[in-house]
Image (tube, rainbow, N blue to C red):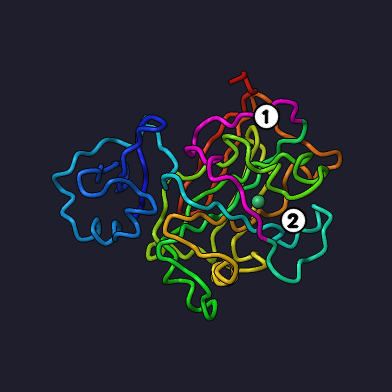
Amino acid sequence: MKIARIGAAGAEKPAIIESDKAIFVDSLISDWDRKSLSEGALAKIAKADLSKLPRVSTSGVRFGSPISQPTKLICVGLNYLEHIKEAGFDTPPEPVIFMKAPDSLIGPNDQVVIPPNSTATDYEVELAIVIGKRALYLDSPAQSAEHILGYTISQDVSERHWQMERAGQWVKGKSFPTFNPLGPVVVTSDSINAHNLRLWCSVNGEMKQDSNTDDLLYGIDHIVWYISQFMELFPGDVINTGTPFGVGMGFKPPVYLKTGDVLKTGIEGIGEITNKIVAYKGA
Ligand code: MG
């Protein structure tokens, strides 16, 4: 199943995507969010007769973030070996995790706004895990799969100066408004093998990142189990699993995003999203 939210920003309706059609399911569930997922929204849709529900072509409609207002947006850092080298770090002995403001989430093809005074806005393609069932203190990675709703494309936009060169935690460079395009769909875990998917990112048509999720240092099941040792995961929570080699920071000299750039971010079996980079125009 492919889960999406379709409509103008702030007025999206929950939908299911079947081939080139979006089928609206707002008569059956309130939204794709923590509350509805906790109340069994997925099972409800799976057994419903969708044949009489309104539908539109997916071409020309706006996709929103496929999950509405997740309670947490958690990131794994330094999780691909070649990226660890380009970032100048040692291989972490256990997963590096950090938080990003969930308010940074935007629709998959919305514009990314470079913050005022930014000189080092960078891109990161990532496979995102979406949680489907509460998870706390899981006994082993083998228990993780049943807690995963599915997977989507995440663009973990990062301001390197604030992330790396200012005091304190990475959250400073990660949480600006528009800094996390997500979508277009969550592909449910029964419909995809997320352990072996090509993922890529290009800027203005030039391929920058091109890797595979089978290169993850700490894999999907390990990540969910590991994070559950430190916090409770709820339905709709999003986990960015880390980015592969090829970010702008890794070039010598670094090549950062600038106004007018077109960023394309894709994952095999999920799709490709496009973000235009624009300047901040004031509140
Ligand atoms: Mg990242």
Return the residue nearer the eye: 135 or 45: 135
Label 2 Cα crowd, 10 Å radius (few <14 / some 14-19 / many 20+)? many
Indicate yes or no: mark 2 CB to ligand 1 under 8 Å. Answer: no
Let me know if residue 112 is in the magenta part. yes
Label 1 Cα crowd, 10 Å radius (few <14 / some 14-19 / many 20+)? some
What residue does disc 2 label?
83
Disc 2 vs disc 1: Cβ atoms closer than 8 Å? Answer: no
Residue 115 numbered mark, or none: 1
Return the residue nearer the eye: 156 or 255: 156
From the top left corner, tell me how far across and down residue 220 is, in percent. 55, 67
Task: Give, as a three-letter code, the residue at label 2.
Answer: His
Q: Secondary structure at mark 2?
A: helix
Query: Within the image, what quadrant is residue 120 found in?
Result: top right
Query: Within the image, what quadrant is residue 166 found in?
Result: top right
Return the residue nearer the eye: 38 or 87: 38
Let me know if residue 86 is in the magenta part. no
Check the image and report above or below for 238 versus 103: below
From the top left corner, tell me how far across and down residue 217 is, in percent. 67, 67
Quarter of the image with the C terminus is top right
Q: Residue at x 38, y 29 (%)?
A: 8
**Range of the magenta residues?**
97-118
Q: Residue at x 76, y 66 (%)?
A: 92
From the top left corner, tell me how far across and down residue 241 is, in percent. 60, 58
Return the residue nearer the eye: 257 or 173: 173
Q: Earlier in the sequence, mark 2 or mark 1?
A: 2
